Amino acid sequence: MRRFTVFRLICLIVPLLGYIRAEANETVAGDPFAVETAFTSMNTVAKPDGFHLSGFVESRNQLATGHFDRPISLRQKVQIEGVRRWRGLSAFISADASWDGAMNTWPGEHDPWRGGLREAYLTFDTNNFDVFVGRKVHRWGAGDGVNPMDIINPLDSKDPLASGRADNRLPVALASLTFSIGKMSFEGVFAPRAEVNDTPEYGSPWEPRSLHEIRASGAAGDEEKPNQWFGDAEFGGRFFATISGWDVALMVFRGFVDTPLFDIGASPGGLTFTAVHPRFSAYGLSFAKGFGNQTWRGEAAFKPDYPIQISTDPADYAPSVGEADLWQGVLGWDCDIDGKYYLNVQMFTDQQSRDDAAGKRRWSGLAYEISGLWRLDALKAGLRGKLYAAGDGALTELFFDYDVNDRWKTSVGLMIWRGEANGVLGEYDDNDFFYLTLRRVF
């Protein structure tokens, strides 16, 4: 009841604030997969010193084409953002509240309410040092849509969609220090407690079939998440330089696997499947360079002794979680034609070293976008998605993003999933849906 009252108050206050202060959010050029191009967050826009309030009210509706009685999402959301700048010091805070009526149609019991503090951090910038502390989405890597080294923030299991868009990542508490000299910089990142993906809720459209079967059988055990402050810390470092026009970065990271693996054990009631998040290390390289209206970029990662699922069948009499060396690579190209037409292609491949893994030793594919601007550049329309080789599936999205004016934005489209039942994307071939999103920014 308290959540409902708070949400109603926010819904009342936010539109009023919008009329008091209406500032259009600027669209930031760059990776089309890394941000929602139709809806840009206020904290990406440079502001003068002083306090600035911003945010949005949004209705996001995803209706499954095969079962209208069980929609994918009917999320109604309010988000408020505030930034205060004073010389080199900046403070940013954001909070949101949402209600998703679709959850009332899913099997099982679900709480459709969600909200609270999202990001809150302080930054201090000088000519040579940048210091950051707080709760934030902190991204690494140069890939578009596939980023092997974008592993600091967990995925939002309640809203996992995307070709890697920023709002499908959840903020984490961390501190970073960056030292810059000339065209080089050194960055250190420290998260005092790791945060990992939540397992998708029972009955959710994003619940993997294998996990649903384990839960339905009553064999699901507890989840062992890293939760000790400083004892379960994550940390990493990055060296960045511009060399002959190429932006090059070397990265190293030590942390926990975000997506849970399942360890099979025995209990008085029978077998149990416990979700675990083992530690791992990662080493990466990224590069990017623009040539006129084109950009070439790439990313590579090596993750030695990476935790993988070996088996979930107790009849195998084998360890259920093992380790394998994992190599990942991305190579991409994008082209902007007269600022109106855009083409982006990113090829990727992953390969691990064990034959007895529950999945394949190698998988590969490409992410793409073909789009254009019309109606005085207010309408963006196109096709984007991912295509995997060897039957692992395809994700295809036809989209139309329209800026009605500086305050009102809308997006409509169709998303289609295809693939074999045990493939990477075939898990979700029942999730084809139409979507309509309306947003008012202020």
Image (spheres, helix red, strand yellow):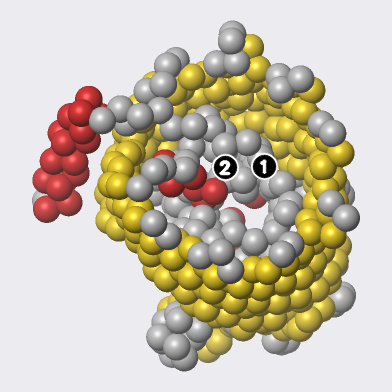
Report x, y in % for residue 160. Answer: 53, 50
Disc number for residue 35:
2
| Local crowd size for mark 2, using a 10 Å CA cut-off: few (<14), some (14–19), many (≥20) | many
Labelled pair 1, 2 in contact (Cβ < 8 Å)? yes
User: What's the residue at 76%, 70% (across, down)?
Assistant: 250
User: What's the residue at 84%, 51% (across, down)?
Assistant: 245
Mark 1 to mark 2 CA distance (whole Å): 7 Å
Residue denoted by label 1: 31
Given residues 116 and 396, the one toward you in this image is 116
For label 2, the SS is loop
Given residues 161 and 442, the one toward you in this image is 442
Q: Amino acid at mark 2?
A: Val
Given residues 333 and 110, the one toward you in this image is 333
User: What's the residue at 51%, 55% (across, down)?
Assistant: 169
For label 1, the SS is loop
User: What's the residue at 52%, 78% (across, down)?
Assistant: 190
Q: Would residue 396 be visible to someone looking at this image?
A: yes
Q: Would residue 417 be visible to someone looking at this image?
A: no
Given residues 248 and 147, the one toward you in this image is 248
Report x, y in % for residue 265. Answer: 55, 87
Report x, y in % for residue 340. Answer: 71, 19
Q: Amino acid at mark 1?
A: Asp
Dividing the picture into quadrants, the one containing residue 257 is bottom right
Residue 73's place in the image compared with 115, above or below, is above
Residue 359's place in the image compared with 382, above or below, is below
Report x, y in % for residue 398. Answer: 65, 25
Dividing the picture into quadrants, the one containing residue 286 is bottom right
Q: Which quadrant is the C terminus positioned in?
A: top left
Q: Give the number of callouts.
A: 2
Apparent side of residue 36 relative to residue 356 in the rendered image (left or right): left
| Local crowd size for mark 1, using a 10 Å CA cut-off: few (<14), some (14–19), many (≥20) | some
